[in-house]
């Protein structure tokens, strides 16, 4: 079995594959201060709860955007399966045609989602990954990854708002029923929601206009923990929270002979 791990700034997603079948998946909060022992124990307990035998897992592949956790997960992999994992990094085959100035600088989180998207969808693809760091990437009909944009997630917008004021509180991040807030809490909620939503919508508009894209041949994919907030009536959105883990599986299949 393969254990695919997608370490994001906010959450770490795990998926267990048997051959080409997704057996189960789960997530934990990403915390760079967690010890190796704690992370390993958490993984083992969750796998046990899901009736997955640790001894059946013989390969691990990892996408990681939190550098402080790389050594921890390499140790965990060696202790769990007796070998180092495959990290998404330079030298690993992805099958993705990256048309950026410096392809090696493209984050592994963006790469794995783009790899899955180009296998599943045709024509033009826009991927919105709505996490603490929100990325919006464009892949053209030739399956060329042309690049994208990076902006703060809605939770970081809230953090900056609270830090920059003496009295404004943290609020629940949710999609409101109307645009005007009748009190301070509701005003903050609406400011964050509509500010974030309009920023994402505006960026999608700019990509569509700049590349003369038509709705009928453009797939707009939404993934990430804040994806549920992005209901953009102007476009038909495809919610796919498994893009990253399937991208890892595809890349593993391209590189499995390198596993050691």
Image (tube, grey):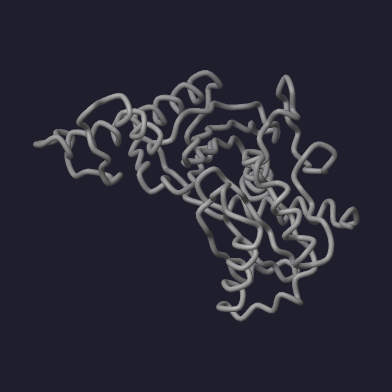
Q: Quadrant of residue 106 in the image?
A: top right
Residue 218 sits above or below residue 103 on the image: below
Q: Nearer the viewer, residue 250 or 40?
A: 40
Which residue sits at x=53%, y=36%? 218
Q: Nearer the viewer, residue 10 or 244?
A: 10
Q: How many marks?
A: 0
Q: Nearer the viewer, residue 47 or 178?
A: 47
Which residue sits at x=71%, y=28%? 105
Residue 63 sits above or below residue 80 on the image: above
Q: Is 200 situated left or right of 133 in this image?
A: left
Q: Quadrant of residue 75 in the image?
A: bottom right
Quadrant into which the C terminus falls: bottom right
Q: Position of residue 151 (x, y in %)?
A: 48, 28
Residue 178 sits above or below residue 37 on the image: above
Q: Is 2 situated left or right of 228 in this image?
A: right
Q: Is 50 situated left or right of 118 in this image?
A: left
Single out the residue that lies furthest toward the bottom.
Answer: 51
Q: Position of residue 10 (x, y in %)?
A: 50, 46
Q: Is 114 situated left or right of 136 in this image?
A: right
Quadrant into which the N terminus falls: bottom right
Single out the residue that lies furthest toward the left.
Answer: 182
Which residue sits at x=82%, y=43%? 92
Which residue sits at x=73%, y=30%? 98
């Amino acid at each position: 079995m393969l254990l695919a791990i997608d370490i994001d700034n906010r959450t770490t997603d795990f998926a267990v594959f048997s051959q080409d079948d997704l057996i189960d998946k789960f997530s934990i909060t990403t915390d760079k201060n967690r010890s190796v022992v704690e992370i390993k124990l958490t993984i083992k307990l969750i796998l046990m709860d899901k009736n997955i035998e640790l001894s059946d897992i013989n390969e691990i592949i990892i996408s990681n955007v939190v550098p402080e956790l790389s050594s921890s997960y390499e140790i965990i992999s060696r202790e769990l399966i007796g070998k180092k994992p495959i990290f998404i990094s330079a030298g690993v085959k992805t099958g993705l045609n990256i048309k950026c100035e410096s392809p090696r600088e493209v984050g592994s989180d963006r790469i794995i989602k783009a790899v899955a998207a180009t296998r599943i969808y045709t024509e033009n693809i826009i991927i919105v990954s709505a996490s603490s760091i929100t990325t919006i990437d464009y892949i053209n009909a030739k399956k060329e990854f042309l690049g994208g944009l990076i902006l703060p997630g809605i939770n970081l917008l809230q953090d900056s708002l609270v830090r920059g004021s003496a009295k404004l509180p943290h609020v629940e991040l949710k999609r409101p029923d109307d645009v005007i807030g009748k009190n301070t809490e509701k005003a903050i909620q609406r400011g964050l929601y509509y500010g974030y939503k309009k920023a994402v919508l505006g960026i999608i508009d700019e990509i569509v206009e700049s590349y003369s894209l038509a709705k009928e041949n453009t797939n707009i994919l939404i993934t990430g923990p804040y994806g549920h907030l992005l209901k953009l009536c102007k476009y038909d959105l495809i919610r796919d929270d498994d893009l990253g883990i399937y991208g890892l599986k595809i890349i593993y299949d391209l590189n499995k002979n390198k596993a050691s």
